[in-house]
Amino acid sequence: MPVGAIIEFSHVTKRFGGVTAVNDLSFSVEPGRVTGFLGPNGAGKTTTLRVLLGLVTPTSGMATIGGIRYRSLPQPLRTVGAALEAASFHPGRTARNHLAVYAIAAGLPRARVDEVLHTVGLDAHGDQRVGGYSLGMRQRLGLAFTLLGDPGVLVLDEPINGLDPEGIKWIRGFLRAMADEGRTVLVSSHLLSEVQQSVDDVIIIAQGELVHRGPLSSLETQIAPRIIVDSPDRAALAAALGRAGIEFTTGRTGLLAAAPDPALIGHIAFTAGVEVSALHRQKKGLEDAFLALVNDNAHGHPHDEHPNDEQPHDGKPHGSNPNDTEPHGTGGEPA
Amino acid sequence: MTPFLRAIRAEFAKTLTTRMWWVLAAVMFGYIALLAGGLAALFAGIESGAISPDAAGTGGQGAPPLGSLPPLVYSFASSVGYVFPVLLGALSTTGEFRHQTLTPTFLANPRRGQVLGAKTVTLFLAGAGFGVVALLASVGVGALVIGAFGVDPLLGDSGTWALIGRTVLAMAMWAGVGVGLGVLVPSQVAAVVIVLAFTQFVEPLLRFASMFTEVTAGIGNYLPGAASDALVGASFFTIASPTGTSTAMLEWWQGGLVLLAYAVAATVGGYFVSWKRDVT
C-alpha cells in the first residue's frame, strides 16, 4: 500500500508580471485525510497547485511533497498523481494510448493502463479517441492518469466539475477510500457544497492569500446564527426590536436579527402587537460561512452586511443540496 | 532502461499514436511521386528522343544541359519533400502547447531538457523515416519512368547511393529544424504559416534573387534550403540558376553542418523562449 506524504507550502508567492496570483501562502496537507482546497474562481488555487507540481516556478518560497520538490522526485508519478483542470489531451489519441504514453515516460508497467481504465469505469471506451469524450469522461480519464503510478499523494483540481450525479457519488466514495488507505488527498473546488460531504479539513484562500484553515467543523463557528423576521408593518417591528435591545439589519426579505432563538423574536413581536409575516432561522450553512470568509477578504467588509441572506452569493444553485447529509450542518437548517 | 531512453520511447509513442505522421507521409509520397515521375517522363523523353524538343517548348535548341538526369529526379525527395518533415517536427512540439499535453508530459517527466532532447532524437529518426518514404517516391517512381524511356537510371552508381544516404540525413535534420521552430514559435497556426510561407515562397525567392551577384550568392548558400541541397548534392535549383552554372555551392558536409546549426540554434533558443517557461 502506498504511503501518503505531507504536502507543504512555505511562503509561496507567485507574480505574473505585475499581478500577484499567490501571496505568501503557507500551509500543510496531512496524509490519511481528504483536504478541500477552496476559494472562488481566480483565487489562485490552480496556480498554487501548479507550483506544487513543478509546472510553475514560484517567485519566492517553495512547495514540497514529503520534503522534496516535485522536480526532484526520483519517480514523480509513483509519488504524486495529479489531475489539473485543463483538459490536457490530444483529441486524436485514444484514451488507452494517452495513458500508455505517460506510463512509458514514467517507466510504469503497461498493465497499469488497463487497470486504471477499469478503476475509473472507462474500459469500454479505452480505444475511443478522446476528442469524442464527454466532459465527465474526460474527468474520469484525468483521474485514471493520476492513478497510473498508484501514488500516495493525490492532487485533484476541480475533479467534480462536469460529473453527473452518479459520477459525483462515485468520486466522493473514491476520495474517502483513498484517504482511508492512508493517502494524502488534496481536492480543490470553488464550491464548498461540492466537497463538504467528503472533506475532513479545509484550506480556504481568496485573492491568493490564506483566509482559513482547519477541520471542516471549524467553519461553523465562523457564523453566529441569526433570525429573519418580517412584518407588513416593518417600521413597527423595527421599533419593537430596538426597544428589546436586539441588534438587527434590514435585508431584502425582512429584518435580520442578531439573536439565536426565533421564539424570542416571536415573543417580542407578540408583546408589541406587531403582526409577523415571516419568522425563521437564517438559512446559513457552511457554504455561507465559506462565502463570508472569502468575501471578507475580497471586499474588505464583514459578512453581516450582506442582507441577501437566502441567495447563494455566486448565483449558482448549489447552495442547498437535497442530499445533504453533512453532520455538521445542524445550525444551518431552516426553522 | 535509462531515463533518456524511456523519454525517447514515450516520444515515439506520442508520434505514432495520432494520425498525423501517416497522413503527412502519404501526402508527401503522392506529391513527390507525381513531380518526380512527371519530370522524369518529360526529360527522359527529350533525352531519349521520344519527345521532340519542339513539343517540349524549348525552341528547337535541344535539351538544356541538364547534367545527369537521374540524380536530379531523385533529389526531389528532399528538394521538394523537405517541407513534410519540417511540418512533422513543428506539429509535434506546437501540438503539446496547443492541446496542453505539456502538463501530463512534465508531470511524468519533470526534467524538461531531457524531454526536449528526447523529442529531438525521436523526430530526427522519424524524419529519416520520412526520407526513406520520400526516396521510395522519387527513386522508386523516378527510376521506373527513366528506365521505361531507355535511359540509364544509374541505380548501380555509387554516386546515386551516396545521394540517397545524404537525402535521408537531410530529411532527418529537417525534422529537427521543425522541432526547433515549434518551440521557438509555440503557436501552431503561426508555425505552420511560417513553414509554408518560408519554404514555398520566401526562401525560393531569396535563393533566386541571391544568385544574381557574387556576394549575395555566397550568403544565399547559407539559407537552409540551399544548405540542404548542398548536403544532398543535386537540386533543380542549382540547375535552374540564372548564371547557367551551379555557382560555388557549399561542400556536402558544410551544407549538413549549416542545416544542423539551424536545428540546434532553433531548439536551444526555443527551450528558453517557451519550453522552460511556466505551464499554465
Image (cartoon, rainbow, N blue to C red):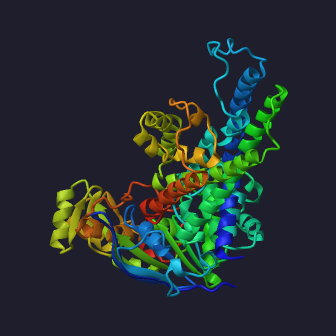
Q: Is residue B21 left or right of residue A111?
A: left
Residue A209 picture location, percent across and down: 33, 73
Query: Which quadrant: the C terminus of chain A?
Result: bottom left
Please, is residue A233 above or below residue B76 in the view?
A: below
Residue A218 picture location, percent across and down: 41, 81
Residue B144 picture location, percent across and down: 82, 33
Question: Which residue appears at 71% of the width and 58% of the height?
Answer: A97
Q: Is residue B273 left or right of residue B23?
A: left
Residue A156 can be seen in this image:
yes
Number of numbered callouts drawn: 0
Residue A192 picture location, percent across and down: 46, 68
Snapshot quadrant of residue B107: bottom right
Which sits in the foreground, A106 or A284?
A: A106
Query: Which quadrant: the N terminus of chain A?
Result: bottom right
Which sits in the foreground, A319 or B128?
A: B128
Please, is residue B65 above or below residue A290 in the view?
A: above
Which sits in the foreground, A136 or A296?
A: A136
Question: Which residue appears at 45% of the width and 60% of the height?
Answer: B269
Residue A142 can be seen in this image:
no
Which sits in the foreground, A107 or A22?
A: A107
